Amino acid sequence: MAEVRLENVVKMYGKKMAIRGVSFTCREGEFFSILGPTGAGKTTILKMIAGIENVTSGTIYFDDRVIHHLPPQERNVSMAFETYNLYPHMTVYDNIAFPLRAPRWRLKLTPAEEKRRVEEIASFLGIEKLFDRLPQNLSGGQKQRVSLARALVRRAEVYLLDEPIAHLDAKLKFSTQTLLKEFAQQYGSTVIYVTHDFREALALSDQMVVLRRGVVEQEGTPEEVYYSPRTDFVGRLVGDPPMNLIDGEVIFQGEEVTFRKGEDFVFRLRGELAGKAKEVIQERNGKPMVCLGIRPEHIRLGEERSSENSFALPIYAVIHESESSVVTFRLRDNTFLYVRTVGFCKYGKAERVWLDFNPDWIFFYRKTVEVAKEGSSER
Amino acid sequence: MELIERGEGEMNGVGNVFFWIITFFVLFVIVAPLAWIYLTAFKAPNDIFATEAKKLIFFQPTTENFHRLFREFPFWDNFLNTVIISVSSTVVVLVIASLAAYSFARWNTGKGHLLFNTISTRMFPGVVAAIPFFVMYRNLGLLDTRFGLTLLHIYFNVSFATFLLYGFFKEIPEELEQAAMIDGYSRADIFRRVVLPLVRPGIAVTAVFCLVWSWNEFLFSFLFTRMAARPVTVLISSFWGSIEVQYGPMAAGAAIAILPTLLVSWFMQRYIIRGLTFGAVKG
């Protein structure tokens, strides 16, 4: 097991900068996730740690050893690829046993020991019945589990998992997550896990980074990332429905500071909030603008005005989920506002209700993402 | 429903007729010369030159031509030359070409120029190369040696084999090799345990092509050998003398000489078809 540290790592593909100075530390025995949308550079980072992509500049350490100049064989990592990369001419058993047979690790297992190791990991992942099959005769989900088994069968210093459960169906996804967590704890393994699904990252990680176009947007525990997103991008990426982002003007009148979005959304900023907003003010079209963010569960619905942070709006749509409901409102400029209610929502469409914003959970950001309006698509 | 079925049936009828006409034509073009060789090989001299049509097929078979071939001519010595030259050149070609093709396919060695240069040795007529080679061989004492002819066959087949294998190696995803590197294998081990098994159909196809080419090669064998290293193709051509054409021993020699290539092609048929369509449909 090892600690993995990246210091100011840059990766260029020709003139295109894919990774723009990424630094983070994954401590020994930690389950560490890299979360980001498609094209953020997650897989590139993983491949640089594995040694199959060169580092353009910067340093990668395992504990205190600089390793980014070493070939993959010298790094003692193991990796599950998103594209599986199973050896097509070998059976499932041989595929899983392949890393155990590499002369490099000097394991010299007897056939019986090898069989025990392969069977252990295969039964862990529920693929022990597929041993004699060739990869071409497996379904996507089966291939993915075989590839995961091949990555986990050997005791490596670092396990690199690239979207290892993305192609499993919902039930298997859940059970495999549990297994992965169990595996990591049982062996105290250092795991670096790449995903585009915030749920997986929040569920599994001890520590995580959110990546955007080759830059780390936030590093922290899942709790920190979820409850105090550092940028509007993180708020938007993590959470479903995503964090509400309202782009508006800050108006100073003597001591009083207000946030205003059109005619229907005026909000007085008291105490700390005014300070927070001032920090991130941007001049746009000659106006001081900020982006207000609040998670859907931090807005409460009521029939009456309960505080001065309340607004009345007609309901646009209600979606009932198993243990909660998502209520959508539409502001006058066509931005949507999402509210998550605990339990079954009793209000109906077009009903006018009061939205009470909890000031403790309001954040202000410099605007860096364009929030989709009606009729456009995000990203 | 009925209408459509009948329509299809009619189409099949017309299609069938064409199919069989073309099949018979192709079969005739391929089989007729072979049949002629095998029939002639077993004919007595009188039957070979008989003008009656029925004598073409109905005659008293004899092995006289084979006896003459083995008694009066160094057939088996020449046959052995052919075997040694074609097999050894094919083996060497496969070793060189597979490594070269892998290097071209994986690392783009020479940025395409080297690959083009290699292939271009096949683009000029062989005769053009014959003169400088001949002078060189005379000075080096390589004329009329198996080693010399093997070298020439290697030279000509390496380019073709490299070109053919390049396509097969190109089909293997690089990520597969990266996975094997992470699994702890060295480049050489990966080549042996991952890459080679995957290009096996390609190597089989290439081997057959090289073997058959070298087996049938005539021009250079004719120019560069006299007696000691003479392959069977040159021997057979020598029956076409200035005074008479000895059809009997010629047909007998050809009948034996084409057997191995026929058999190899037959057994490798499955591989060849799979090899040539390799990559056309991704599995």
Image (cartoon, coloured by chain):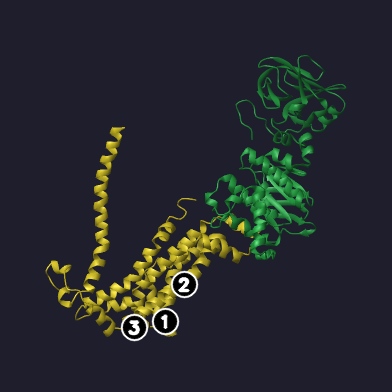
Chain colours: A green, B yellow
Which x, y percent locates residue B34?
A: 26, 67
Pointer 3 chain? B
Q: Quadrant of residue B151?
A: bottom left
Which x, y percent locates residue B122?
A: 41, 67
* Residue B137, disc: 1
Pointer 1 chain? B
User: Which residue lies at the image location 27% right of the left edge and 54% below the top edge?
Assistant: B23
User: Which residue lies at the image location 23% right of the left edge and 77% below the top edge?
Assistant: B63
Q: How many marks?
A: 3
Disc 2 target residue:
B91
Q: Residues within 10 Å of mark 3 (few under 14, many from 20)?
A: some
The CA span between labels 1 and 2 is 22 Å
Q: Quadrant of the C terminus of chain A?
A: top right
The CA span between labels 3 and 2 is 25 Å
Chain-order first, disc 3 or disc 2: 2
* Most distant residue in the left direction: B52
Disc number lying in front (3 or 2): 2
Q: Quadrant of the N terminus of chain A?
A: bottom right
**Label pair 3/2, CB-CB below 8 angstroms:** no
Q: Is residue B183 visible?
A: no
Q: Residues within 10 Å of mark 1 (few under 14, many from 20)?
A: some
Which x, y percent locates residue A192?
A: 72, 49
**Mark 3: which secondary structure?**
loop
